[in-house]
């Protein structure tokens, strides 16, 4: 593997870890970080979290985007920002999902992507 590709994978992992920590630090619960690089052709890491309210969900996604810019990650797309159940922010190699409790149970991404490796993100 070329050094630049390895560095890119490491920086994506570092960003995913930082995004998971930020979600937890901004009152999200049940934060999970999955390495899906071996089972997904679309992305390498999923950050899945449960928000406390629609407003808090938007705030955590905004905070993660603000943190991402200076380290070279830009959101390719964002979906659900005006909704109240699920916000997705796609940074290509890292995808952040912030759900309401009901939506998280309904969509069950934790189980859907259960073949991915669960990454310990807590300090």
Image (spheres, rainbow, N blue to C red):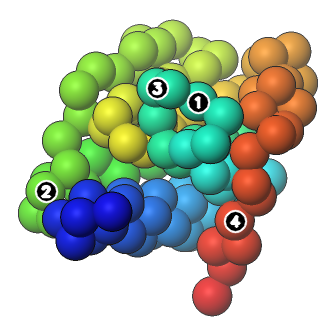
Q: CA distance from mark 4 to mark 1?
A: 16 Å
Residue appearing at x 79%, y 16% in the figure: 107
Are the two marked residues, 2 and 4, in contact with CB atoms closer than 8 angstroms? no
- Give the residue number, with chain letter if any, for mark 4: 119
User: Which residue in the protein does label 2 denote?
Assistant: 72
Do the residues bearing badges 4 and 1 touch, measured as CB atoms within 8 Å?
no
Q: Position of residue 23 (x, y in %)?
A: 55, 57
Label 1 vs label 3: CA separation?
5 Å
The secondary element bearing badge 2 is classed as: loop
Q: Residues within 10 Å of mark 3 (few under 14, many from 20)?
A: few
- Quadrant that contains the C terminus: bottom right
Disc 1 designates what residue? 40
**Residue situated in front as seen by the camera: 41 or 45:** 41
Q: In the rendering, which numbered label is found on residue 42? A: 3
Is residue 29 in view? no
Residue 107 shows in this picture: yes
Give the mark nearer the N terminus: 1 vs 2: 1
């Amino acid at each position: 593997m070329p050094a630049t590709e390895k560095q890119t994978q490491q920086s994506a992992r570092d960003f995913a870890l930082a995004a998971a920590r930020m979600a937890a630090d901004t009152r999200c619960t049940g934060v999970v970080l999955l390495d899906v690089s071996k089972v997904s052709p679309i992305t390498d890491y999923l950050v899945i979290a449960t928000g406390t309210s629609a407003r808090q969900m938007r705030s955590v996604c905004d905070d993660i985007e603000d943190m991402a810019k200076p380290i070279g990650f830009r959101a390719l797309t964002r979906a659900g920002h005006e909704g109240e159940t699920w916000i997705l922010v796609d940074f290509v190699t890292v995808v952040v999902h912030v759900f309401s409790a009901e939506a998280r149970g309904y969509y069950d991404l934790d189980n859907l992507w259960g073949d991915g490796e669960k990454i310990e993100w807590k300090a």
